[in-house]
Image: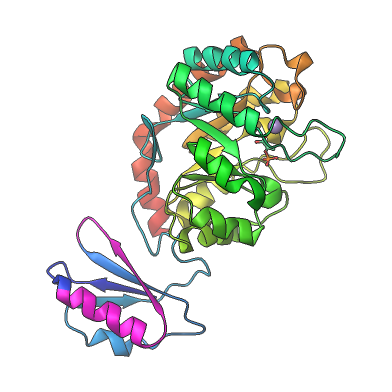
Amino acid sequence: MLIVMDQLATAAEIDAVVGAIEARGYTARPIPGGQRVAIGVLHNHGAVDASMFLGLEGVKEVIPVTRPFKLVSREFQVEDTVVRVGDAEIGNGHLTIIAGPCAIESDEQALTIARHVQKAGAQLFRGGAFKPRTSPYAFQGMGEEGLRILAHVREETGMPVVTEAMDHEVFDLVEAYADVIQIGARNMQNFSLLRRAGRAGKPILLKRGLSATIEEWLMAAEYIMEGGNTQVILCERGVRTFAHHSRNTLDLSAIPVVQKESHLPIIADPSHAAGRRSQVIPLSRAAVAVGAQGLMVEVHHAPETALSDGAQSLYPDQFHELCRQAHAIHGMFSPYRDHAADIQRSA
Ligand code: PEP
Ligand code: MN
């Protein structure tokens, strides 16, 4: 339930409503808006009786929340969330491009790729130091040394860095080095890790699970927001289907659906969806055309030698072309985007 306060409601009236919610054993979450404050009611098991709040001073209306997710929903917050990292503002109408290798392999490899992708227009650098691999015999990442290399890349290029925290054991370490902490597809429903991410002081990039529904994905984001971290970026990276022509199937329709249901920014990762280089540029074009607010792309200067995901990694010149095409498409559609969001909200 959402209690919407009058535009002229005083701080004391807002406090009184918060007190009334808490007196009933629920959690009150004030959400400041441009015009007025709304107060979310959380941790209620079952319906809340609206009439007990309607009579309180300063209350304008009480809106039942129909979705199982609350803090992430458009019902709770109409305005888009903007996640700010360095100079990048994800979710405010720009197209943010994140690029880099699947895994950090050496200082030289990371810096070489970082310089290429920065020149092509990437704003954030990505690279895994702790890698979730299907086989225990495959390269598992460089660990803390990889994080140190990421910090070096940031120092040299000024680009903020995105890297995955695979488990609790390494979360503190990753949080200390990263500018954005990635929760990977395999961990999307690792609820204790999501709770830890909710206490993090850095933005979280939450990938969609391998076979997660949109509702399950948004509930995972709810765990993070419920813990107090409002800086969440959703990332569609393809889901498992019967198809073999690609590694996963990029669920393009998830992008407008998520934008209708949630105020959180959503980006696309065409690399892990495709699994092969030849599909990455076309899928990037499509993702931008359906409204993705950013792309995360794997790039390697010598993909044939890459220790992971070489087959889907773009050569630097291909990435350059991807950026050019993606920005051209974004430029065509961005004037319509606000209007589209209004339509989505009312639909
Ligand atoms: C990655 O980004 O390198 C990765 C492992 O992604 P995902 O969790 O989507 O498979
Ligand atoms: Mn990868």
Q: Is residue 107 left or right of residue 247?
A: left
Q: Is residue 222 left or right of residue 312?
A: left
Q: Image point 17% across, 82% down: which residue?
A: 57
Number of labels in the image equals 0
What is the quadrant of residue 219 in the picture?
Answer: bottom right
- Most extreme residue toward the top is 317
Q: Position of residue 244 (x, y in %)?
A: 84, 36
What is the quadrant of residue 113 in the picture?
Answer: top right
Q: Position of residue 97 (x, y in %)?
A: 50, 27
Decide whether residue 29 is among the magenta residues.
yes
Q: Does residue 7 appear in the picture of this structure?
A: yes
Q: Image point 53% across, 56% down: which residue?
A: 221
Foreground pick, 181 / 276: 181
Q: Image point 71% across, 12% down: which residue?
A: 302
Region of the chain picked out in magenta, as a range = 12-35
What is the quadrant of residue 112 in the picture?
Answer: top right
Q: Is residue 75 left or right of residue 126?
A: left
Q: If the picture is divided into quarters, which one holds ligand 1?
A: top right
Q: Position of residue 22 (x, y in %)?
A: 35, 82
Foreground pick, 166 / 231: 166
Instruction: Using the image, determine if residue 140 lies above or below residue 188.
Output: above
Decide whether residue 58 is among the magenta residues.
no
Q: Does residue 209 appear in the picture of this structure?
A: no
Locate the C terminus and report the quarter of the image it occupies.
bottom left
